[in-house]
Amino acid sequence: MMENAIHTLVLDVAYRGAAFSGFARQPDQLTVQGELEDALRMLLRRDVETTCAGRTDAGVHALGQVVSFDISADEMAELDARDEDSGRPRFASVKRSLNAITHEDISVRGVRQVADGFSARFDAKAREYRYFLAVGTTPVVLMRDFCWQVPGSASGLDVAAMERASRCLIGEQDFKSFCRAASAEGKPTCRNLLEVSFSTEMVMGEELLVIKVVGSSFLHSMVRTIVGTLVDVGRGRRSEEWVAQALAARERSAAGECAPAQGLVFWGVRYE
């Protein structure tokens, strides 16, 4: 337990999600939070409680995850002394140690001090996710583990219809139809969706459709269910109006399938 003034540090973290049972620590499971907290325990020689900007499900990747935790003034002085003695930039030793200790599919890309009491979760204004789909007739190879291979050609998936159908989702809505049913029981399901946009990008020489989803916060599996629902519209299996009807139903069975986890990336967080 810390006995003197408390300061707050932030880790900027990326990870490949396939190996993990999600971000949140779980008993007897490999998780991102578990790996980070175990590494911080070794570094600070005590238990450390972390807070992330957004919990990700099993198999979901992250490029811009933010994780905050508190340290004492004495611990801060000790960390600073390590870098001053070696002539390295501030917190370089923390970054190096964490990357040496944690799982190979986790990358601590930065360590920085923020305002005391800062919370990666509660101070966040918006979270951004990006979902990657392969929609061409040729199977992808290099991006296979980071996208959903959707049958049909790019011209066969009606992206314009998907875009029109997504407009009803913008704003503060009740997204009970778009989250895992068990997680919604007895909990508020209204969320404010700020953006759903579509673009085509070449990634590692392979053409992918990217769906960008930005919101103040998200429900369990909400982004993946939105993507799965919009893909049904793009394939012509459902009408554009069906998305609004599914939203209004407030029933999980009214919406489409939950898209595979490997196509989803927690892209970043906005704090202003």
Image: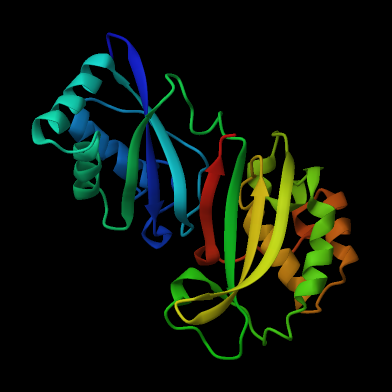
At x 87%, y 50%, the residue is 248
Q: Residue at x 83, y 73 (%)?
A: 238
Q: Position of residue 168 (x, y in %)?
A: 85, 54
Would residue 241 be visible to someone looking at this image?
Answer: yes
- Decide if residue 114 is on the left or right side of residue 233: left
Q: Is residue 210 left or right of residue 236?
A: left
Q: Quadrant of the N terminus?
A: top left
Q: Residue 235: horizontal and vertical position, in percent?
A: 76, 79
Residue lying farthest left?
Answer: 85
Q: Position of residue 114 (x, y in %)?
A: 41, 27
For residue 177, above or below residue 201: above
Q: Is residue 117 above or below residue 135?
A: above
Query: How many numbered discs sit on the rendered protein?
Result: 0
Tell me if residue 180 can be seen.
Answer: no
Seen as rendered, the residue at the extreme bottom is 138
For the residue pair 249 and 9, the one nearer the viewer reads as 9
Give the side of residue 168 with respect to residue 122, left or right. Answer: right
View extreme (top): residue: 4
Examine the rendered structure and indicate whether residue 191 appears above or below residue 3. below
Image coords of residue 197 (percent x, y): 71, 61
Which quadrant of the structure image shows residue 38?
Answer: top left
The C terminus is located in which quarter? Answer: top right
Q: Residue at x 73, y 80 (%)?
A: 157
